[in-house]
Amino acid sequence: MLKKRIIPCLDIKDGTTVKGTNFEGLRNAGDPIELAKKYENEGADELVFLDITATIEERKTFAELVKNIAKKLSIPFTVGGGISSVEDVRKLLEAGADKISINSSAVKDPELISDLAKEFGSQCVVVAIDTKLINGTDCVFVKGGREMTDLKTLDWAKKVEELGAGEILLTSMDGDGTKNGFDLRITKLISENVNIPVIASGGAGKTEDFETIFNQTKATGALAASIFHFGEIKINDLKNELKFKKIDIR
């Protein structure tokens, strides 16, 4: 059994950390490198940095920022946004990223998952799935949540595992930024139907939300942003509480 991980996510826009609700209404949350260092000191297990406008604006994730992050951090971190080729990934890994996250490019060219897994190993290939319930069906969205695809979330999750992804970052767009709790239904569905780690994302608002997601689903990681960025929950306090509740936290 994998130990559970607490993972702050830093959405980056124009070099600054931002946070919104349901993928919209962004506000400034601070300097990404300063926040990253703070989270490491507080006991974060990993970090995720997503360049949230890279795909929309068709530009690449800024490798220079990744280099600067790598100089300051000793915990693993994942980088995503605008990654569409083996060469993109090579640059980011060389800059110091431990894992990369792909979303829109994986949907556009599923073989990219296999290519990356063969070249760098499945362990560094994270496929991000942004999902929303539309008329009773779980649908996959791309381009920062702006475009619906014809993919069904469960089918796509199984497919990315088959293609060689090492992990799934599952974001419920319905829960994103709401602080109403993680989406238990979709997280349970996906985590019970794949054999690779699933990180739950979208909706964390209080300590109990982390306890619930770990107790009621097979998610091995829980990702959050605004509750950490704006100081509502301290990571070390959260981990102490989870350990007290007998959750096998890293």
Image (tube, rainbow, N blue to C red):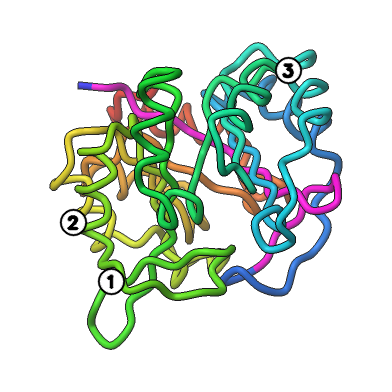
* Region in magenta: 2-20
Q: How crowded is mark 2: few (under 14 residues within 10 Å), some or many (20 or more)?
A: some
Q: Residues within 10 Å of mark 1 (few under 14, many from 20)?
A: some
As drawn, is 244 to the left or to the right of 155? right
Residue appearing at x 44%, y 75% in the figure? 148
Disc 3 residue type (three-letter): Ala
Residue 236 seen in this snapshot:
no
Dominant secondary-structure state across the stretch colored magenta? strand
Q: Distance between the residues labelled 2 and 3?
A: 34 Å
Pointers 1 and 2 in contact (CB under 8 A)?
yes
Q: What x and y, as percent, mark residue 188? A: 21, 53
Quarter of the image with the C terminus in it: top left
Residue at 86% in and 40% down = 31
* Neighbourhood count class around disc 3 (C-alpha, 10 Å): few under 14, some 14–19, many 20 upward: some
79 shown above or below 176: above
Mark 1 / mark 2, whichever is N-terminal: 1
Foreground residue, 189 or 225?
A: 189
Residue type (three-letter) at the residue carrying disc 1? Asp
Residue 8 is inside the magenta segment: yes
Measure the alpha-carbon separation of dots 1 and 2.
10 Å
- Of tags 1 and 2, the one toward the viewer is 1
Label annotation for residue 70: 3
**Residue 117 lies in what quarter of the image?**
top left
Q: In which quarter of the image is residue 140?
A: bottom left
Residue hosting label 1: 138
Foreground pick, 224 / 199:
199
Image mark for residue 189: 2
Q: Quadrant of the N terminus?
A: top left
The image position of residue 206, as x and y in percent, is: 50, 53
Q: Is residue 181 magenta?
A: no
Mark 2 and mark 3 lie on one chain; the one further toward the N terminus is 3
